[in-house]
Amino acid sequence: MSHERKIGARRMRADSFLATILPAIILAVLSPLAFSQKPVADLPPGPMQAKATTSCLECHEARIILQQRLSKPAWTKEVDKMVKWGAVVDANDRDALIDYLSLNFGPDQAAYAPPRTSAAKTSGKE
């Protein structure tokens, strides 16, 4: 085989490889993004809603917080632990944030009821 043919064959293999692998890589990267777009639940209104959203939802989905029913001492430990792990909570806002979480997600609140999904509605499971 001539030198030009070898180069041409290599180029065709490389082009074929890229044509096969590149779409697979793009699909692998973009698919989780497409499937992860769920409706975002909001934290309840209150003076610390915005701070809780920026401090907590940086790493967690709102659902993680919405389902908690912790006492004030437990929320205090949780907030302090998260700050040690990198959550950004201004020292001046710490107590108010704990009060907000304790008020909205304390043990005296009703149990968390997850939103119904469209799959449950369409499957006949009511």
Image (tube, grey):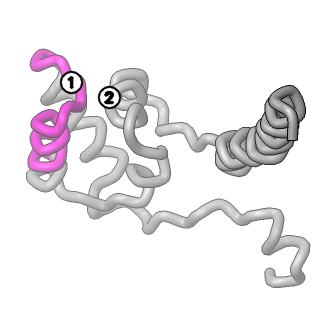
Against 64, is 117 above or below?
below
Residue designated by label 1: 89
Which part of the image, by quadrant, shows the N terminus?
top right
Q: Measuring from the top left, give residue 94's x and y in whole percent.
A: 15, 27
Report how far apart the C-alphas of labels 2 and 1 lie in the structure: 6 Å
- Mark 1 residue type: Val
Q: Measuring from the top left, give residue 118's x and y in whole percent.
A: 82, 63
Tell me the residue at 12%/44% (across/down).
81
Q: Which mark is residue 42?
A: none
Based on the picture, tell me whether residue 85 belongs to the magenta stretch.
Answer: yes
User: Where on the picture, by quarter, is residue 37?
Assistant: top right
Q: Are marks 2 and 1 in contact (CB under 8 Å)?
A: yes
* In this rendering, position of residue 71 left or right of residue 126: left
- In the image, which residues are magenta? 76-92
Q: Residues within 10 Å of mark 2 (few under 14, many from 20)?
A: many
- Mark 2 residue type: Ser
Can residue 115 be seen here? The reply is yes
Determine whether the residue tagged by mark 2 lies in a helix, strand or loop. helix
* In this rendering, position of residue 102 left or right of residue 23: left
Residue designated by label 2: 55
User: Where on the picture, by quarter, is residue 17?
Assistant: top right
